[in-house]
Amino acid sequence: QHVEVADIADEVSSQMLSENSSLQTTRQPDAVFLLEVNALPQLAAKLKVNSTVSHGGQDFIFYQLESFSLLVKTYGDDSPQVREGRHLLRDGIGRLIDDVRELYDDNVLVVSAMIENPVNTISRKTRSVLQSEFTQTVDLRLSSEYSEDYPAIFNIILIMSLVLAITVLAVSMSMAYMDPGRDSIIYRMSNPRMKKDQ
């Protein structure tokens, strides 16, 4: 089941902030961060309702906190807002882990990862095909295009070739089995010459 933060998080709770807190719910980066941190205990409550443990299944929970980087980018890494944000985040994750361990009888694997420098992340540069300056034509060895008359012309040539081959074969066979004693024009012309030669 896919659950968004907006589905489970209520409004930003000002109860989680102390009176001298540097985070304020009126500023956009602070409000988004507090909303995501406030969703952690509600996520644990949602898990208790929707867990598959009673059915013998396994649950996979993936929680991505994107607003902390916005907090760092807005205020700087050493700012009091970021320090308080780290403290709230550690507390929220710790409470979530405790709730999940209680729910799953301590059969839990928790992995936490933080990308500190987004410049070092692997990314893929994209560019439009229309931006390419050098276009190299690649020989794809495609067959040549034929006109729509090609099948008709091919059949005519094929049938004429077969008829010609059969005709040549028939004439050759008839000449091979021709009777030499037969009175034909061929023998009439050659017989007197043969008699003179004897």
Image (tube, rainbow, N blue to C red):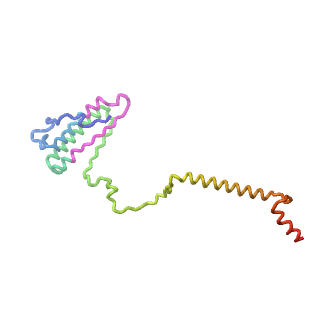
Residue at 12% x, 38% y: name it. Answer: 18
Q: x%, y% of residue 179?
A: 83, 57
Above or below, 24 against 53 in this view is below
Q: Is residue 152 left or right of residue 39?
A: right
- Which quadrant: the N terminus? top left
Q: x%, y% of residue 152?
A: 56, 51
Q: Is residue 158 left or right of residue 103?
A: right
Residue 5 lies in quadrant: top left
Q: x%, y% of residue 196?
A: 88, 71
Q: Point out the stretch of residues depicted in magenta.
A: 43-69
- Residue lying furthest right: 198
Residue at 72% x, 56% y: name it. Answer: 169
Q: Is residue 188 left or right of residue 11?
A: right
Residue 127 lies in quadrant: bottom left
- Residue lying furthest left: 20
Residue 181 lies in quadrant: bottom right
Q: Nearer the viewer, residue 147 or 46?
A: 147
Above or below, 86 against 15 in this view is below
- Which quadrant: the C terminus? bottom right
